[in-house]
Each structure stands twice: as structure tokens, then as C-alpha cells.
Image: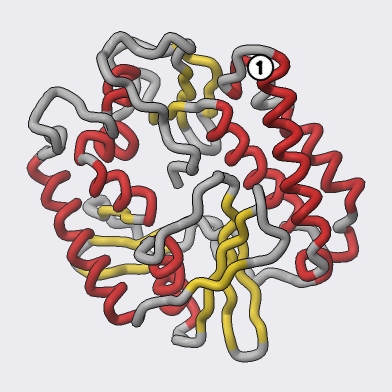
Amino acid sequence: MAFNPNAIFISPSTITDFEKCPQLYYYRSVYRTPRGLKIQLTNPSLALGGIVHDILSQFLNMEPAERNERELLRIFDFLWTGISGEKGGFSFAEEEKAYRERASQMLKRFWANPHFKTTLSVKIPSFPKVEMGNDIILTGKLDWIDKEEDFYHIVDFKTGKNEEKDDSIQLPIYAFLVSQLFKTDNIKASYWYLDKNEEIVSFTLPDLKETAEYLKKKGEIIKMARQTNSFRCQSGEETCWACREMYAVAHGEGKLVSMDPVNRKQEIYIFPKEGISKPEAVPISEELPF
């Protein structure tokens, strides 16, 4: 795919952000700090989700013969240091200990499933891209995809406590992405709620044509917003529950606790337990912003 300076990238996370509030989308996807980096918030739940995903990504990129429980735990111990203490939004040692134990239990559930010990994933680009037309490009970050007979099976690892709704857009979008990459409609999808379930839970996908139309519509709306710089808060006020904390960080609040200028190209902030100065602050989501 040739470089397109006018390209607008859409994904499950960017669409969800825009639907919650255009200003939230702006601060997550458009805004850059004076260092040229994105801004991101963290808290213990987000840190937990991020680290479990990173551990499983590294582990599953290994050849099946190299996958063993000792290596899984080694990766766990090594990566946890990157979110320990304030970097993960932990306020005290007992809080971090409790979240580390949750991560450990998730990895135990994962290791108990023999499928992921021996199965090779289907290789796709780390940043897969599908052209939707009119300078709109679909992308996404898939946790796992393998092939079962004639079907491609997408599995999304979930680390939060809440289950996805039946009308969730994430897996339908991933299914459409995979259908375009491999030119097939033979796709099935599942969630794995690692915080509570021993087994994978299947998800009923809608018709791929419906998903394609949905993506084109949302892509055009986001493209117009970017072209006209129209990112007003959906509440009509300065901020709302969805964008308030990101707005606060962009305007000098929050505390910078870590920076990744190479891979995710972001600055990561936390708020003290007393919260931000703006009223009615709402805790940020337990789910990952990608």
C-alpha cells in the first residue's frame, strides 16, 4: 500500500472514542504534546489490561516448541517492572499486589488451555491495513487468529470485569478486516474473559456487508470532522464524562509517569486519588484504548 498523506485511519477504538465524544477522539488520536507524542491515561485496571496483553503477545509470538510455563512467568516478571508503582497508577504496595495476583490468575487460566500451547497463529502484519476507499483505511490490533479447517478464528482476550454487549463493534470490525486480508467470508470470532472464565466464549458475527457499510459511514463522519477540525464536546459544554480527563491532561493537569517515544509514541499520565480539579470526574475505563 503506497503512502497516502491524506489517509484517515479508523479502528474499533477510534470509532468507539468518536461515538463517546468527538473531543475524546481528538485528544486520543489527533492531539500531540510539545514532544510530538500522544497522551494516554493509566490507572491500575488499564495497567493490568495492558501488561497481560503484552505478555501474551510476546509469548504467542514464540514457536510452540519454545512455549512453556516457565517462559510465560519469566515474561510476566520482566514486563511487570515496567508498570510497577506509580507507572501503573498504583498508590500503595497492597494495591499493586492485588492487581499482580489478578494478572497471575489470568495467566494460569491461559496456560491451562492446551490450544495456545501448540497452535501456530495465522501471520498478519503487526499494523494490518485495508483500504475502504476515499482515503479511509481500516486497521486494528488483533490478539489472536488461527485457522480451524476452512475457518479463520479470531480470539480477543478480555481482562476487564465486564462482558461485551451483543452489539459490540470490535469483533465484527476485526472479522471484516480479516475477510479483506484473506479474501474469505469463513470467519468466526470469540472472546476470552480471562479474569473469570476458563473457556472461550463464541460471538455471533453480523453480516460482513453490514459491517462494511457501517465502517464506510463512520469513516466518512470522522474524515469530515478532521477536515473541518470539528471536535466539539458532545455535551455542548467544555467537557463531559468521556473527555474530561484527557482534556485536563492536555491543559497541564495530571502527572507524567512514563514515556514511550519509540513504540506507542505516547506520554502516560496518572491522576492522584483525589482526582482532577474539574467536577464530576468519572473513573476511566478498564478496557484498552486500542
Q: Residue at x 76, y 65 (%)?
A: 116
In this image, 221 relative to 93: left or right?
Answer: left
Q: Where, by quadrant of the figure, is residue 254 drawn?
A: top left
Amino acid type, mark 1: Gly
Q: Is residue 37 visible?
A: no
Q: Which residue is drawn at 44% across and 42% down?
A: 289
Density class for disc 1 (Cα within 10 Å; few <14, some 14-19, many ≥20) is: some
Q: Nearer the viewer, residue 96 or 290?
A: 96
Q: Residue at x 40, y 66 (%)?
A: 166
> Which residue is the extreme one toward the bottom?
150
- Up the image or down, 248 lies above or below 161; here it is above
Residue 148, image x and y in percent? 66, 83
Q: Nearer the viewer, residue 64 or 208?
A: 208
Residue 152, image x and y in percent? 57, 79
- Up the image or down, 199 lies above or below 73; here it is below
Residue 228, image x and y in percent? 8, 42
Quadrant housing the N terminus: bottom left
Residue 257, image x and y in percent? 54, 16
Q: Which residue is drawn at 20% across and 40% down?
A: 22
* Circle 1 residue: 85
